Image (spheres, rainbow, N blue to C red):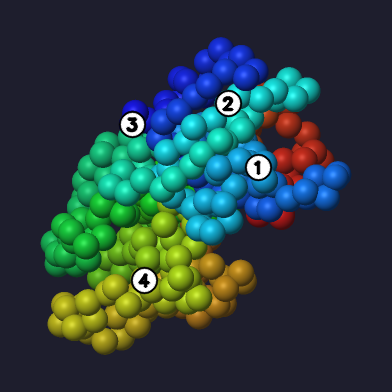
C-alpha cells in the first residue's frame, strides 16, 4: 500500500471522492452528535494535517474503540467530505501497519543532516579535544540515541515542535552560548569552564529522546528530560577528565536550565544556558507565529497585539 502524500492531501479534492493508503494517525477523541450518537474526531498527518471523522456505523469505529492508534502509522480507506469550505476525511476502515516509520509522514522544516554536520563542526571548533571526546561518545557517535536525536521534536506544542526540532534547537542554543562566551566572558573563563558551558548547551535537552516520541510524551516522562539527560551522562569518564566538582556543575545546567519554570538556577553556568535557552525558545515561537499569520512583516506586529500575549503564555 502506497503512502498518502502531502500533494494528494493538498491537491484538488472532490466531496465524496475516494482515497486510500498509508498515513500517520496523530490523535483522536470521542464526541457526541446532536442526536446522542458517538463518533470519533481526530487528525491525520502526511506532510500536512488533515481532520478526520469516524461514524459509529463505520468499520473503522470498533478499530479506534478497541485499540489506541494515536501516533500510529495506519492504512485507511476513506472519502472526502466538505463542510463550510473545510475538507475532512471520513474513514471507512483503518488498521495499524508495522514496519513503517512515523518520520515518513511528519512535516519537514529542517535539513537534519546539514544541521547535524554543522552542530558537530561548530562544537568541535569551540571546545577542547577532551571535551569533544565526551560530546562524541555521549551523542555524536552514540548509536543508541543519535538517530532519535536528529529527528525528535523539541516540544509537543511550543517551539520547534516538528521533526528535527530538537536538533535545530540544540544547534541554536550551542551557537548562541558560544557567542555569549566570546562576547562577554572570553577573557574571564578558563577552557574547562568554556567546555562546561558548551557541553551543557549540547546536552541540556538530550533527555527528550527518552521523554518524547515524535512530540508525544512517553510512559517514562513521569520524570522530565532534565533528569533523564543526567542519566545519560558517563559520570566516571567526566570525573576522570575534569573532576567531580566540574561534573556537578554540568549537572546543574541540565537540571536547572528551565530556571523559574523548573528548578531555580544555583550556578552561573546554569543561569547562562537558561537565558540562552529562553531566548531561542521565544524567538523561534515568534518566528512560527509569524509563519502561521498573514501578517508576514515584522512592522505589522503591534507591541500590544496577540503575538506578545502568545509569548507570555508560552
Q: Residue at x 78, y 34 (%)?
A: 302
Mark 4 — residue? 229
Foreground residue among 241 and 182: 241
Secondary element under disc 3, as helix, strand or loop, is: loop
Mark 1 — residue? 57
Residue that lies at the very extreme toward the right in this rendered image: 34
Q: Nearer the viewer, mark 4 or mark 1?
A: 1
Q: Residue at x 62, y 71 (%)?
A: 260
Secondary element under disc 1, as helix, strand or loop, is: loop
Residue count near mark 3 (Cα–Cα under 10 Å), binned few <14, some 14–19, many ≥20: few
* Nearer-N-terminus badge (4/1): 1
Foreground residue among 20 and 124: 20
Measured from the top left, where is residue 187 in percent x and y? 33, 61
- Give the distance between the C-alpha atoms of the residues marked 4 and 1, in whole angstroms: 47 Å
* Nearer-N-terminus badge (2/1): 1
Mark 3 — residue? 1
Secondary element under disc 2, as helix, strand or loop, is: strand
State the image quarter where residue 312 is shown: bottom right
Q: Residue at x 54, y 30 (%)?
A: 78
State the image quarter where residue 52 is shown: top right
Amino acid at each position: 500500500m502506497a503512502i498518502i502524500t502531502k500533494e494528494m492531501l493538498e491537491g484538488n479534492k472532490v466531496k465524496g471522492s475516494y482515497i486510500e493508503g498509508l498515513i500517520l494517525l496523530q490523535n483522536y477523541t470521542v464526541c457526541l452528535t446532536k442526536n446522542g450518537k458517538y463518533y470519533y474526531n481526530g487528525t491525520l498527518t502526511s506532510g500536512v494535517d488533515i481532520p478526520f471523522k469516524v461514524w459509529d456505523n463505520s468499520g473503522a469505529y470498533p478499530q479506534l474503540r478497541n485499540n489506541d492508534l494515536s501516533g500510529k502509522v495506519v492504512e485507511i480507506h476513506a472519502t472526502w467530505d466538505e463542510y463550510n469550505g473545510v475538507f475532512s476525511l471520513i474513514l471507512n476502515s483503518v488498521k495499524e501497519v508495522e514496519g513503517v516509520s512515523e518520520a515518513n509522514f511528519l512535516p519537514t522544516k529542517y535539513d537534519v543532516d546539514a544541521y547535524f554536520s554543522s552542530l558537530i563542526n561548530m562544537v568541535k571548533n569551540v571546545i577542547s579535544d577532551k571535551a569533544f571526546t565526551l560530546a562524541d561518545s555521549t551523542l555524536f557517535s552514540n548509536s543508541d540515541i543519535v538517530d532519535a536525536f536528529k529527528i525528535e521534536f523539541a516540544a509537543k506544542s511550543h517551539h520547534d515542535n516538528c521533526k528535527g526540532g530538537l536538533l535545530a534547537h540544540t544547534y541554536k542554543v550551542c551557537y548562541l552560548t558560544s557567542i555569549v562566551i566570546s562576547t562577554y566572558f572570553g577573557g574571564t573563563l578558563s577552557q574547562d569552564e568554556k567546555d562546561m558551558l558548551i557541553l551543557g548547551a549540547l546536552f541540556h535537552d538530550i533527555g527528550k529522546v527518552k521523554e518524547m516520541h515524535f512530540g508525544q510524551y512517553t510512559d517514562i516522562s513521569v520524570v522530565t528530560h532534565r533528569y533523564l539527560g543526567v542519566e545519560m551522562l558517563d559520570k566516571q569518564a567526566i570525573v576522570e577528565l575534569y573532576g567531580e566538582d566540574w561534573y556537578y556543575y554540568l549537572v546543574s545546567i541540565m537540571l536547572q536550565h528551565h530556571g523559574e519554570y523548573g528548578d531555580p538556577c544555583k550556578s552561573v553556568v546554569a543561569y547562562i544556558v537558561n537565558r540562552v535557552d529562553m531566548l531561542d525558545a521565544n524567538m523561534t515561537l515568534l518566528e512560527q507565529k509569524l509563519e502561521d499569520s498573514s501578517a508576514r512583516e515584522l512592522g505589522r506586529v503591534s507591541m500590544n497585539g496577540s503575538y506578545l500575549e502568545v509569548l507570555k503564555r508560552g
